[in-house]
Amino acid sequence: MNSQDQWPFPPIGLSRVQASIHLGIEPKEFERLVGAGEMPQHRRLGSREVWHRQELEIAFARLPTSAAPKEKVKASTAGNPNAYSPQSLAERWVCSERHIRNMVKRGDIPAIQFGGKLIRIRMVDVEAYEAGAAMPLLKQG
């Protein structure tokens, strides 16, 4: 019996075991993929570690197929292929680096800051933003 049989809607947050089952792999392999940065990190929900189901699915979809050659990593993301610099994200979105930095400053997209100007935006956060960006904005009453 899977989690979808137990609930009218599948859960958003999955435990380590549920996440590995959702991906069809053993928990030890899931832990290795998380450690290698191929799967997203957990979130804290009280004292529990949970993984966002959609983030897992996005990360899974980005894994190369067996027939596809591995993508070449640009120099701007070479240090961490799972994160973007403001410049590399601006290239992806065809906008200015300043616009990306303003989005981070406003909190539109989360980022990790290393000192003054050095920031990185995780690939899973970019993909989540892109997935939600097409959603219409609801006006507050």
Image: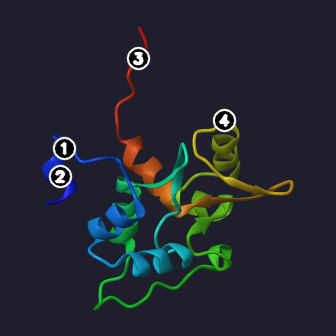
- Mark 3, residue position: 139
Q: Which quarter of the image is occupied by the N terminus? A: bottom left
Residue placed furthest toward the right:
116
Label 4 or label 3, whichever comes before in sequence order: 4
- Mark 4, residue position: 106
Give the Cα separation between the discs numbered 2 and 1: 5 Å
Q: Residues within 10 Å of mark 3 (few under 14, many from 20)?
A: few
* Residue 17, x across and y down, in percent: 36, 66
- SS class, disc 2: helix
User: Which of pointers 2 and 3 indicates the residue nearer the eye?
Assistant: 2
* Residue 135, x across and y down, in percent: 34, 37
Give the Cα separation between the discs numbered 1 and 3: 31 Å
Residue placed furthest toward the top:
141
Q: Residues within 10 Å of mark 4 (few under 14, many from 20)?
A: few
Quadrant of residue 140 within the rendered picture: top left
- Mark 2, residue position: 4
Disc 2 to disc 1: CB gap under 8 Å: yes
**Residue at point 66%, 44% (across, down):** 104
Give the Cα separation between the discs numbered 4 and 2: 37 Å
Q: What amino acid is at disc 4?
A: Arg
Q: Nearer the viewer, residue 28 or 113?
A: 28
Name the side, left or right, on which 81 lies relative to 19: right
- Mark 1, residue position: 7
Label 1 or label 3, whichever comes before in sequence order: 1
**Residue at point 41%, 64% (across, down):** 16
Give the Cα separation between the discs numbered 2 and 3: 33 Å
Count of number-bearing discs: 4
**Residue at point 47%, 75% (across, down):** 31
- SS class, disc 4: helix
